[in-house]
Image (cartoon, grey):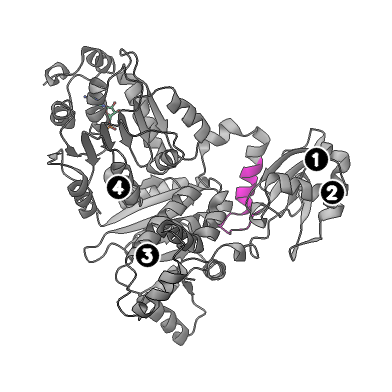
Amino acid sequence: MTFEGLGIDARLIQATDELGYVNPTAIQEQAIPVLLSGTQDFIGLAQTGTGKTAAFGLPLLHIIDAAAKYPQALVVCPTRELCMQIVKEIELFKKYMTGISVVAVYGGASIGLQIRDLKRGVQIVVATPGRLIDLIERKAINLEQIKYVVLDEADEMLNMGFQDDIEFILKNTPKRESTWLFSATMPAEIRKVSKKYMKDPKEVTVGKVNTANKSIDHQYYVTTAQHRYETLKRIIDFNPGIYGIIFTRTKLDAQEISERLTREGYDIDALHGDLTQGQRDKVMGQFRDKTLQLLIATDVAARGIDVQGITHVINFELPDDVEIYTHRSGRTGRAGLQGICISIVHQKEMYKFKQIERINNSQFHKMDIPTGKDVCRKQFFAFMEKLLSADISHGDYETYVPMLAEKFAEVSKEDVLKRVAAMEFDRFLKYYENAEDLNARERDRSTREPRGQEMGRRREERSSEGGRGDSRAEYSRGGGSGYSRLFVNLGTKDGFFKASFLQFVLDMSDLKKEVLGKIDMKDMNSWIEIEKGAAQQMIRSLDGKNYKGRRIRMNDADSGGPGGFSGSGNGSRRPRRGEG
Ligand code: AMP
């Protein structure tokens, strides 16, 4: 079989020729003729490496109307990397076609630039679910005219918790003429989605459907050492129904993280060697009957525990030993259930991680750490489900209905819903409003940050090796300019925005705005550039003073002073989760 025989445009054949494609691959042979019709739903069970990108990319380019300058095709895929890769390939395929443009939209990059790209009249949008919904909400993208939706690596998207988002996207493409779903495996959830949103899909399988280790999906998140704890929290928040075990290397870590998370409203307790048998039994009892959602433990302490229905195992830190990794991950995915084993790693641990991956003989999936928005949306979906499934069969609610009706007579149903949502979510939304991107991105680091900062950050990672949440000042500028860089343990979590923060430090120090340079605000702390001559006055005026009952610490970030942030003590400002 040749590409000509498949019926695709000569200009596409010219491009694939140049790429060295001689014959279509199996999935291309079976998918392309079907997809060219544009109206047939399709399921392709194929793994990466089978040529599936061309299998949907070529027919898409063939059937897109180049003269119509609005989005006609939407490709949804799980990660930013895949998103970029798909766009790159489509760009190559369309080399000899004019008038068709394709854009990638994904989290962790400037949404402004993506919005600008979208406005240029693109026909094909390749997106990750979170960012796409963000754009829909901002009305920056119009899905009205979308005819073709491609779900690439659908099983991955579901594993990553994007089921609701995908359904949302499918519901919001009213003129969809066909849906093309590609997946390496066919779990029940995908069947459900396809039953609900696809019509008589033609199903094609190439090779054998992934079966190796299919009960456990191995995922990993790459972050910096100082963001390990925040990343853990975000993963937990992104999985509202999680019932999991978190593993740490040391007893102290288990204890500290457990205490910190408890303070912040999570249902968690620690299992460690210092507990008496009685205490241990109590913790285990609570975990078994699901009063505790999360258990944090060292390998030694978790030895021998056997609990059914664990949804997630999280490696807060990687174990040294592959065997231990296997043992940890084996706590989930039992008795025919699907489980997820997540590892939080930072770049310097990648070599160790690759070893584990190799020896474990299964492909591990790199995940983007969800953005604050992703988390909020996820929690919102979960909340709606909770509201809808609330059990009202037992209480004597009927008695109160007349009173309720009277009290709420003037309030619309919509307003009532808004208020209920606000009660549950306001603080949550605020917490995540300015949430930073926790992904460690090698490429961004080398292109965006001045050299001094990058090295400073490396230094910082080393200093907090071992995964302790608290860390030194984030990076230093290395002097040289007329400015000093001051560290202060106040940030957006203290309720500051840049302007109010600026006003606050100037008021406190009685200095003029002109002495300040760049202000870099993070959740828990900030860095202020200030003229060298004014630096000491500012430090004297702020360091050691109180703000809302907390001691302010300020010092010169370049002078190598302690400069850490007060990790604990900030925690209580996070909203409580769940019922609490
Ligand atoms: P994919 O499964 O889409 O990630 O593709 C895997 C690799 O195979 C990519 O590098 C493609 O460029 C390449 N490829 C796709 N189709 C063909 C083909 N028909 N002949 C040769 N290489 C191909």
Q: Residues within 10 Å of mark 2 (few under 14, many from 20)?
A: many
Q: Which mark is residue 538?
A: 2
Q: Is residue 298 magenta?
A: no
Q: Nearer the viewer, residue 66 or 354?
A: 66
How far, Cα to Cα, is label 3 from label 2?
A: 50 Å
Q: Which mark is residue 530?
A: 1
- Residue 408 image point, x, y percent: 45, 66
Q: Which mark is residue 167?
A: 4
User: Nearer the viewer's eye, disc 2 or disc 4?
Assistant: 4
Whether residue 120 is visible: yes
Give me the residue at 15% from left, 43% from top: 208
Secondary structure under tag 4 reads helix
User: Nearer the viewer's eye, disc 1 or disc 4?
Assistant: 4
- The reply to whether dot 2 and dot 1 touch (C-beta < 8 Å) is yes
Residue 293 lies, with reference to residue 459, above or below; the image says: below
Indicate which disc, 1 or 4, sits on the residue closer to the N terminus: 4
How far, Cα to Cα, is label 2 from label 1?
A: 9 Å
- Residue 200 image point, x, y percent: 12, 41
Residue 267 lies, with reference to residue 31, above or below; the image says: below
What segment is highlighted magenta in the picture? Answer: 456-471
Q: Which amino acid, by three-letter code, is at mark 4?
A: Glu
